[in-house]
Image (tube, helix red, strand yellow):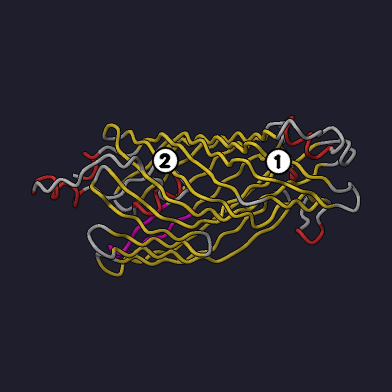
Amino acid sequence: MMRYLLVLFAFTHMNCGWLLAQDVQNDNVELESNIIPYRPRIAEITLNNLYDYNISSNSDAYGNANSEMERDTQMKIRLGVPIIMKGETMFGVQFKYDRHNFVMDKDYDLSHYELYDHIESHKFTSLGGRFLFQQGFDKNKQITVVAGAEMKSDLFKWQANTTKYYALTSYEVTLNKNTKIGTGLSLGYTLTAFQIYPFLSYEHKLSPKFTMDLYLPKSAALRYKVNHKFYITGSAEVKGWRYAVSNNELAPNEILTLRKSDLYLGLSFEHEIYDWLWFGFDPGYAINLRSYLARPGDRRRDALIELNADNAPYARFSLFIVPPKKFYK
């Protein structure tokens, strides 16, 4: 059950904290460590930064240009609220707010290329909510449904070209005390682009300390439990974003879509500050997969501007709340 609580409260995979704790050998501590599982995030504030990467543009309609992105900063805030937690049934909601801004190198003249000028002079926002329903049965089986909507734009406009609607359903089976496997289907309608893909989840406890967590085709992770207050994770995850762009010089009276997708490779460190309050630090490297500006619903092959972004280092800092230990005793 706790695996899919993470889908509602975080929709992200394991972040871990500073390398500060020691693995205490006391029997009582070990007993507590075995009782307390990896806990999901109920609320969080996270700051993600990509640093110093070159970006170039190719377009028949708008010409070519290049610049340097000094900082690509995304702040996200999540607040999950459980409403029903009774037996094998859970229902809850999550509120989401993201703020994304870009700082480009001042040595480059951006005024001659409208897209770069617009990216730096505007902040991009994601605002919305989602709900989760989870029902267990036969002691080792579970069905989960997640659905939500959000606005993703440089201006506050709630319409088809600026909003995302999505739903996810999954079926999970606990095979034994060490292994869970599941499958499901994800549907999305993002800024008029329809998306559908099946996924497979697999969680296997390799040893008392190591757990492998796969959520294919999106992510793969290997988590190391130093103790119940400290986790380290190595992961590979595909992450991306789409925003609606309102700019009359690029497209008069038309809303366009700006998209970027990266493969994040990194380590995550997560450490307890006080029972329910934790701190995370994630360093790593982001490999750009695709980036472009297009009309709503169009794919990369129909892009108005093809963007080529270099790979870049990233650092993520997070402060978050998890359920107190007393809930697991």
Q: Residue furthest bottom?
A: 175
Q: Amino acid under label 2?
A: Phe
Q: Amino acid under label 1?
A: Glu
**Looking at the picture, does residue 244 appear above or below residue 260?**
above
Q: Are marks 2 and 1 in contact (CB under 8 Å)?
A: no
Query: Residue 167: percent from the left, percent from the top?
Result: 56, 54
Mark identifier at residue 163: none
Mark identifier at residue 68: 1
Magenta-colored span: 134-145
**Cα distance between the residues tagged 2 and 1:** 25 Å
Query: Residue 271: percent from the left, percent from the top?
Result: 32, 40
- Location of the C terminus (image quadrant): top left
Identity of the residue drawn at 60% across and 53% down = 262
Chief SS of the magenta region:
strand
Q: Nearer the viewer, residue 324 or 76?
A: 76
Element on which disc 2 rests: strand
In this rendering, position of residue 274 left or right of residue 9 = left
Which circle, 2 or 1, is nearer the viewer? 1
Query: Residue 158: percent from the left, percent from the top?
Result: 71, 37
In this rendering, position of residue 265 left or right of residue 320 = right
As for residue 140 lying within the magenta part, the answer is yes
As for residue 212 lying within the magenta part, the answer is no
Element on which disc 1 rests: strand
Identity of the residue drawn at 21% across and 39% down = 326
Query: Residue 170: percent from the left, percent from the top?
Result: 46, 61
Q: Which label's residue is closer to the chain start, 2 or 1?
A: 1
Q: Nearer the viewer, residue 208 or 310?
A: 310
Q: Which residue is mark 2?
A: 281
Q: Residue furthest left?
A: 27
Q: Nearer the viewer, residue 20 or 41?
A: 20
